[in-house]
Amino acid sequence: MKLYHDFSHSEDFSLFYETSEKGNVEILFFNAKINIIPDEIINLEYLGWLSINNSSLSSNSLNLIGENLKNLEILEITNSSITYIPNSICELVKLEYIDFSNNNIVEIPKEFSNLINLETLILDNNEIELFPSFLCNLKTL
């Protein structure tokens, strides 16, 4: 059974903290002005889908995702303040779907070539001027 939490219409995470039994939450949605990723989320070892929208997250905050959430398959961070994608995100080799639309990202790191399972990459409405050729080497993209 997948445990699912949707905070699309709330900024009160106390219920989540009380019900996230031993990190078993697999799907988590936020639509809130968070500017850091709480430790309670970073410690969700089984999290496979993380969606954060309309946040004030910085690019540095994403390092924690890459360093800790190794089971992520879907990562959506849209309408936020991200200016670059940290290399640690590129260590999430289970990622199949990434949506970083409506941010201020300037370039895609060459380490993206490590994402061998990536099937979908959405980068609409960013500041990327050049599509890097190394992405063509990703067979599933």
Image (cartoon, rainbow, N blue to C red):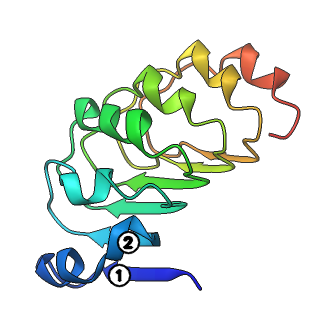
**Residue type of the residue flagged with mark 2:** Phe
Locate residue 105, reporting x and y percent: 39, 30
Say which residue label 1 marks: 6
Residue matched to label 2: 29
Q: Are marks 1 and 2 in contact (CB under 8 Å)?
A: yes
The residue at 14%/62% (across/down) is 33
Q: How far across and down, in percent of the image, does residue 97 sit?
A: 64, 52
As measured in the structure, the alpha-carbon distance from the residue carrying label 1 to the one carrying label 2 is 5 Å
Pointer 2 local density, CA inside 10 Å: few below 14, some 14–19, many at least 20: some
Q: Which mark is residue 122?
A: none
Instruction: Answer with left or right where residue 43 lies relative to residue 3.
Output: left
Name the residue rendered at 65%, 36% in the picture: 93
Please state which of residues 70 and 103 is positioned toward the viewer in this rendering.
70
Amino acid on which the number 1 mark rests in the picture: Asp
Residue at the (74%, 15%) spot, across then down: 134
Q: Residue furthest right?
A: 139
